[in-house]
Image (cartoon, rainbow, N blue to C red):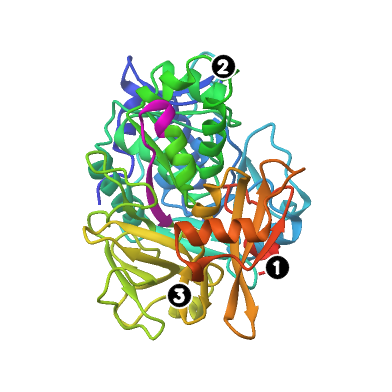
Amino acid sequence: MTSLLPALSGASRRPDSPEAVRFGEHVLTYAQLDTASASLAARIAGAGRVAVWATPTPETVVAVVAALRAGVPAVPLNPRTGERELAHIVADSAPRWVLAGADDELPAALDGTERLLVRTELLPGGTPAGDGEPALPEPSADSPALVVYTSGTTGPPKGAVLPRRAIAASLDALEDAWRWTGQDVLVHALPLFHVHGLILGVLGPLRRGGSVRHLGRFSAEGVARELLSGGTMLFGVPTMYHRLAGALEDPGAPAGLRKALAGARLLVSGSAALPVHDQERIASATGRRVVERYGMTETLMNTGVRADGEPRAGTVGPPLPGVELRIVEEDGSVIEDPASIGEIQVRGPNLFTCYLNRPDATAAAFTEDGFFRTGDMATVDPDGYVRIVGRKATDLIKSGGYKIGAGEIENALLEHPGVREAAVTGEPDADLGERIVAWVVPADPGAPPGTAELADHVARLLAPHKRPRVVHHLDALPRNELGKIMKRSLGV
């Protein structure tokens, strides 16, 4: 296959090398990234795997790009992972080195792994690190590029082996869908140990020859500043857009935030469902709608609302080019009625190869005809737009003979003025099979809406059988670093 990052080719010889990545005041041009990553690639070439201490810094970008150029699978490590989980990942992936910056403090779980320093600065005399390194051969399309660990419903995290062709296929499909070009400047504050922040948020711009500005920590002020100074696209998770929606309604909103969001070419949300209420708040304030896409660690990107398509609230758009998507019943039969809820299965060049060291889990994840079982439940609009209603394990509620998706009830609850955040689960019920339970963060903790009030609200908007039978009031919903609600922490 052609290079994953063609814009790096010969970049070190260009006197007018454009900006590749920016983290605050720290900028790397394509020439600097080329030479720094070439130097590191030469050192790690031939290793079985390397780990990357994935802080939101230029060092992480250099480390991952170097591994890609060397054809060595990289294992991004979340710096906030607990010791037991981190020890499992290191033992399972057995990296030859951990690539880290000079200022990184590594935990005890990495004591047995040799550290290799990642440099981004120029050497004394102004010579870029790696200048003159010979080019390494381009690996095959099916060779592993990354091993990204993803938590399952049970047991320790599994390492999804992502081949180079999957990264290329997803990024090229998004190029087509979003008209993504080398002129785009992407703004985000996503973590770099995950598909969203690393593959879409860093490798995406670098594959196009564009640039990325990482905020370090998310803030409405940072978003406004970067979009007003040349940013064209914003990637975020629902928590970020929720905060932006709130900031837009605050009289003390950052100067220019409304103008910045309105002027962006594309606002994209992913990693979890964006509540319709927040979409409408942003659209009302800016005239700009947020588009959603749908992907997973194992599949990278499956669907996405196109730049020239209708940004329909509550949907993640149609399948991307090259992706086959079908909705199936519990017995695996394909659902003919697109309005019926079923599990999403996908097939295409965007899929992972296997779970590292887990042939049993790999075999269980695929059907006999090569479709991946996502575990996500959805319906499909007549024009192909996919509406995800939740995870099969936690968001599909079977109550009174109905299959009910938690997502639509959550969106309905968020339309109630007394609800600031909401999650919906099911719990066993002797009569109904399962009853609907709402977990609500009230807008006013001193006057939370009661069960009857919320039940009537949902029944009026949706249907009586979708009303919550139990309501719990919380100070906050448990969320992970990507903003996903951790429903298993709610007692599911």
Q: Nearer the viewer, residue 72 or 425?
A: 425
Q: Earlier in the sequence, mark 2 or mark 1?
A: 2
Name the residue carrying label 2.
124
Instruction: Residue 252: give x, y in percent of width and height.
Output: 60, 18
Of tags 2 and 3, which is closer to the observer? 3
Name the residue carrying label 3.
403
Instruction: Residue type at mark 3: give it.
Output: Lys
- Proximity of marks 2 and 3: CB atoms separated by less than 8 Å: no
Q: CA distance from mark 2 to mark 3?
A: 66 Å
Q: Nearer the viewer, residue 154 or 5?
A: 154
Q: Earlier in the sequence, mark 3 or mark 1?
A: 3
Q: Does residue 288 show up magenta in the picture?
A: yes
Q: Which residues are magenta?
A: 283-295
Q: Mark 3, residues whose alpha carbon is within 10 Å: few (<14), some, or many (≥20)?
A: some
Name the residue carrying label 1.
491
Toward which corner of the image does residue 163 lie, by quadrant?
Answer: bottom left
Of tags 3 and 1, which is closer to the observer? 3
Residue 490 visible at all: yes
* For residue 205, side relative to residue 94 (left or right): left
Q: Earlier in the sequence, mark 2 or mark 3?
A: 2
